[in-house]
Amino acid sequence: MAQITYLTKEGLQKLKDDLKELKTVERPKISAQIAEARDKGDLSENAEYDAAKEAQGLLEMKIAKMEDLIANSRLIDESQVDTSRVFILTKVKIKNQSNGAIFNYMLVAENEANLKDGKISVDSPIGKGLMGHEVGDIAEVKTPAGVMKFEILEISR
């Protein structure tokens, strides 16, 4: 059974745009490379042909994955997001208990994560560790560097 992914309207549109780009630009580019390599003669010893065919296989796999992701995605109505607990699409202000550093993150689906924009994946170690906690809770997050403790200071939309 395919995994359901929750996306924002913008995230779903970006995914659809990326898929369209792969199908309408990248696919014809690789087809042209294959045709060009085929025109060079003996295919049994044609490295360009082999490389183009491999690139085509990887592209088709990527397209299939994206189509599956879109088919199994669900839009989240941001106005209906419950802010009593940390959940996907909530903004959370946390305080690192060991050094007092304060961070602001928005929890999003994996393909929408962008640390520069303060968006972390609900599937990341910190995202998983924060999920379901309320304001005032101390979340113990298992990271590759060990267990970190974060106090939930604020949850908003």
Image: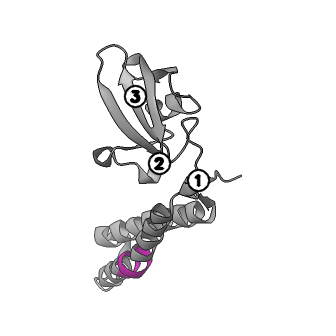
The crowd level at tag 2 (other Cα within 10 Å; few <14, some 14-19, many 20+) is: some
Q: Which of marks 2 and 3 is in front?
A: 3
Q: Residue drawn 58% across and 59% down? A: 77
- x and y, in percent, of residue 67 in the image: 56, 67
Between the residue at mark 2 and the residue at mark 3, the CA separation in whole angstroms equals 20 Å
The amino acid on which the numbered mark 2 sits, given as a three-letter code, is Glu
The amino acid on which the numbered mark 3 sits, given as a three-letter code, is Ile
> Helix, strand, or loop for circle 1?
strand
The amino acid on which the numbered mark 1 sits, given as a three-letter code, is Thr
> Helix, strand, or loop for circle 3?
strand
Q: Residue 5 carries which label?
A: 1
- Name the residue at the right extreme: 1
Read off the magenta span. Answer: 22-28
| For marks 1 and 2 on the same chain, the one whose residue lies earlier in the sequence | 1
Q: Residue drawn 37% across and 24% down? A: 95
Location of residue 27 (image quadrant) = bottom left
Q: Residue drawn 47% across and 69% down? A: 13
Location of residue 28 (image quadrant) = bottom left
The crowd level at tag 3 (other Cα within 10 Å; few <14, some 14-19, many 20+) is: many
Question: Badge 3 is on which residue?
Answer: 94
Say whether residue 54 is magenta. no
Q: Which mark is residue 57?
A: none
Question: Badge 2 is on which residue?
Answer: 110
Against 49, residue 118 (above or below) is above
| For marks 2 and 3 on the same chain, the one whose residue lies earlier in the sequence | 3
Q: Taking the image as drawn, is residue 124 in sight?
A: no
Whether pointer 2 and pointer 3 mark residues with C-beta atoms closer than 8 Å, the reply is: no
